[in-house]
Image (spheres, rainbow, N blue to C red):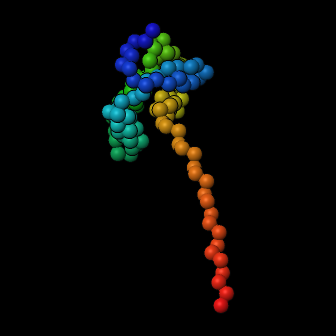
C-alpha cells in the first residue's frame, strides 16, 4: 500500500483534482526547503547552475513527502507535461500547519463613574 511509511503524521491534499496522501516533512527537510528557496530567489548573486540545482532539490524534497508511488508518478507526469506549478505543491507544507485558535472576544470595560465635587 505505501512505499515507506515511517509512522509520521499524514494528511490528504488536493493536487490538480486528485487526492494525494502526504506525510509530514521532517525538520531538516523544512530547513533544506527554506535554504534552497532562498538560493532560488537570489537571481542576481547566484549562478544559473546553482539555482537550477536548488529548484531540483526543492521538487525532490516535496515529492519525498508523497506517500504512494503512483501519486508520486502522477506529480512527476504533470511536471513533465508542464501542467504543474510549484505553487501546486505548497499544500505539502501547509497541510501540517496547525489551525490558529479563534481570537478571544475583546471585553471592554465601562468607564469609571464620574465623581462630582
x 45%, y 9%: residue: 1
Q: Quadrant of the C terminus?
A: bottom right
Question: Residue 25: x percent and y percent?
Answer: 39, 29
Above/below status of 74 relative to 50: above
Q: Is residue 83 visible?
A: no
83 with respect to 115 (left or right): left
Residue 3 figure quarter: top left
Above/below status of 105 relative to 111: above
Decide which of 47, 9 is in the foreground and name it.
Answer: 9
Decide which of 51, 112 is in the foreground and name it.
Answer: 112
Q: For the view shown, which residue lies furthest in the bottom direction?
A: 117
x 61%, y 53%: residue: 105
x 34%, y 41%: residue: 46
Q: Is residue 26 visible?
A: yes
Question: Residue 18: x percent and y percent?
Answer: 58, 19
x 46%, y 14%: residue: 68
Question: Residue 31: x percent and y percent?
Answer: 35, 37
Amino acid at each position: 500500500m505505501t512505499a515507506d511509511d515511517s509512522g509520521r503524521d499524514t494528511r490528504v491534499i488536493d493536487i490538480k483534482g486528485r487526492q494525494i496522501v502526504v506525510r509530514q516533512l521532517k525538520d531538516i527537510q523544512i530547513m533544506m526547503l527554506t535554504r534552497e528557496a532562498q538560493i532560488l530567489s537570489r537571481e542576481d548573486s547566484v549562478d544559473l547552475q546553482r539555482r537550477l540545482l536548488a529548484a531540483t532539490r526543492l521538487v525532490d524534497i516535496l515529492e519525498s513527502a508523497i506517500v504512494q508511488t503512483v501519486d508520486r508518478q502522477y506529480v512527476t507526469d504533470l511536471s513533465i507535461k508542464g501542467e504543474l506549478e510549484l505553487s501546486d505543491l505548497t499544500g505539502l507544507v501547509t497541510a501540517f500547519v496547525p489551525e490558529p485558535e479563534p481570537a478571544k472576544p475583546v471585553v471592554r470595560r465601562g468607564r469609571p463613574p464620574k465623581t462630582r465635587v
